[in-house]
Amino acid sequence: MPGPGGEGGVETPIVVVALLKLKAGTAAEAIDAFRPVVEKTHTERGCQAYALHRDGGDPDTIVLIEKWASQADLDAHFVKPYIEDLGELSSKLLAEPPRILFCEPLAIGDPSKGMI
C-alpha cells in the first residue's frame, strides 16, 4: 500500500474531517468566525474541498470536511494566519477538544461517487 507520497511519486489526496462540539448557544458565532476562513481557504493551492456542515441532529456540532491535493498543501494551510487565529476561538466556543481525523481515500466502487 503506498504511503502519503503515493505510487510513483504521485501524491495521495488527504481528507480531513473535524468534528467540533460547540458550547451551547455559540453556533452562530462559530459559523461567522469560519466564514472568512472558508473563503480564504478556497483560494489556497491544493484545496480541493473545504466545507462546513452543521449536524442535523445537534445544532451545537459542526463538521468541517476538507480535501487537499497533498500533504505539503495541507501543511502550508496549517500555518496560514487565519488558521492559527482559529486556535484562539477554541476556548471561547468549543465545549470539548475537536476530534480531527486525517483520512486516506480508499478507491472502492465508482471513483466519482466513492471518493471525496
Image: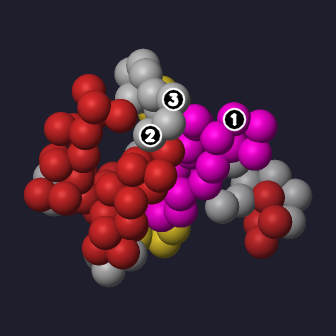
Residue at x 25%, y 39% (from the top left corner): 89
Measured as percent of width and height from the top left, residue 16 is found at 49, 46
**Near-viewer residue (14 or 26):** 26
Number of marks in the rendered image: 3
Query: Dividing the picture into quarters, in which one does residue 72 lie?
Result: bottom left
Q: Residue at x 31, y 69 (%)?
A: 36
Image quadrant where one finds the C terminus: bottom right
Front-most of residues 34 and 47: 34
Magenta region includes residue 62: yes
Pointers 2 and 3 in contact (C-beta within 8 Å): yes
**Mark 1 Cα-neighbour bin, 10 Å: few <14, some 14–19, many ≥20:** few
Which secondary structure, mark 3? Answer: loop
User: What segment carries the magenta color?
Assistant: 50-67
Q: Residue at x 48, y 71 (%)?
A: 48
Towards the viewer: 71 or 51: 51
* Residue 90 appears in the figure: yes
Residue 24: numbered disc: 3
| Image quarter (top left, top right, bottom left or bottom right) of the N terminus | top right
Checking the image for residue 90, the label placed there is none
